[in-house]
Image (cartoon, rainbow, N blue to C red):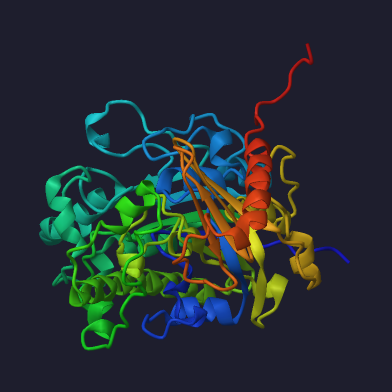
Amino acid sequence: MSRPIPRHVLWITTDHMRFDCIGAHGNGAVHTPNLDALVSGGVTFENCFAQNPLCMPSRCSFMSGLYPQQTGVTANGHCLHPDFEPIAAREFKAAGYQTAQIGKLHFQPHEDNDLDPRQRNSYGFDVFWLAEEPGPYEDAYMTWLRTEYPELVDTFRVVRSNHPDRAGEREGKVLDAPWQASFSGWVAEQTCRYLDTGSRQEGQMVHMGFYAPHPPLNPTREMFAPYADAEIPLPARASDETADKPEPLASMLRMCSDWGEEKFRQYRRHFYAMVTGVDMAVGQVMERLRSRGQLDDTLIIFTSDHGDMCGDHGMILKQHSFYDEVMSVPWVMHWPAGFGDSPRRVEGLVEMVDMLPTLLGLCGARPPRVMQGRNYAEALLNGDEPDTRENVFAYHNPGHAMLRSQKHKYIRYANDEEVLYDLSSDPDEVVNRVGDPACSEALHELRSRMLGRSLEASRSPQRLIYRY
């Protein structure tokens, strides 16, 4: 019997959205009815981990199936080569799909991009409607906003990312404007328009790139409504987590030392509202697919590049702390024609580099051998348990790395300082066990395994021409 092949692929990515920012993942404080529907009728990887805690290196990694050391993008500010291969759009195109990029991609630095006369690289997408941030420069979103909602341009425009006023945008501000005019609303409308123009016989792969819930935390009235009077739980934090941590991590733990409980609650309140804005967009696109009779035959993937601390451990945003709040991200797939409509949870450890090989496998394509990620397509289609990983690996320039198993997490900073958590007894990652004799054997083993993973993740993706 032949395998089903999805007619359309909708790859949805967010920015800063951690695993527990979906209601169906156990967070009763966040309002995500449409994402909950994807979870309740699809496949959820409960332990998916990013290969880098920052946007650009994570995105270049999971959209190539390679580790940051192999793409050359190991921190924000690096630039993925315009002809880099393998990369998602070119692989889907080779599999017979027309490809479209709508919203945030972030393979290149975007600060001051409207002052740079050079052409932006499309990385193989047939349609390229790029907008990396909501408003600082003239891009696809601002062009649309000036046309459709000219009176709201100043409402949604934010200052550039290196402007000192950006720090104040973390505290949250509700905009007196319709959701439809927001960045998330624009991504939804453009996606629906693109789907409407395509042939019903032609396969389409669309990357919906949301900027939210990345600050600035400026939800519209509709987005904020579920949280205006809601009780928001406090973040999880211990009384003093810096005492046993090396300075690279201790300095991060001190970043919000002057914040009180209410300020953290407000951060979460507005952050969750930004998540709800994304959920509204997902619902609009799902309804459009349903009205066209295409929802069952569309493979929808929902994920994020990394998470946000949201006050846990007394931190916000993301850094190379490597806490699960930053590294653990959603990976949800919904495709009734291929998976059925019953919920399925995969509990084993997986990496984001596994995503692209798996998606290509589901679409009947053979992932390039150079890809480091694993292909779980056959197991998922057969209803079997995927052969997941013993550990997951992450790397951040200039030499910070993490290795995580089900029982332990090991972090090594560039100055040879180390952190070890015993996750079986300390799942909240509070106590550094590096100096504990009871953990010496585990520490030795994890050091050795990190060396092996680092070497494996550094293999060149360059094509061999001659062997001499």
Q: What is the number of callouts on the image?
A: 0
Q: Residue at x 33, y 75 (%)?
A: 235
Instruction: Farthest residue to the right: give it.
Output: 1
Quadrant (top left, top right, bottom left, bottom right) of the N terminus: bottom right
Residue 171 visible within the image: yes
Give coordinates of residue 78: x percent, y percent. 41, 33
Quadrant (top left, top right, bottom left, bottom right) of the C terminus: top right
Give coordinates of residue 194: x percent, y percent. 45, 57
- Relative to 247, 218 lies left or right: left
- Relative to 368, 85 lies left or right: left
Above/below status of 167 relative to 315: above
Q: Residue at x 29, y 73 (%)?
A: 268
Residue 149 visible within the image: no
Quadrant in the rendering for residue 214: bottom left
Give coordinates of residue 294: x percent, y percent. 58, 70
Q: Nearer the viewer, residue 294 or 41?
A: 41
Above/below status of 28 relative to 127: below
Quadrant in the rendering for residue 163: top left
Above/below status of 350 relative to 395: below
Q: Residue at x 73, y 22 (%)?
A: 464
Above/below status of 443 relative to 296: above
Give coordinates of residue 398: x percent, y percent. 44, 35
- Relative to 181, 361 lies left or right: right
Instruction: Farthest residue to the top: give it.
Output: 468
Q: Residue at x 38, y 40 (%)?
A: 76
Quadrant in the rendering for residue 385: bottom right
- Relative to 154, 382 lies left or right: right
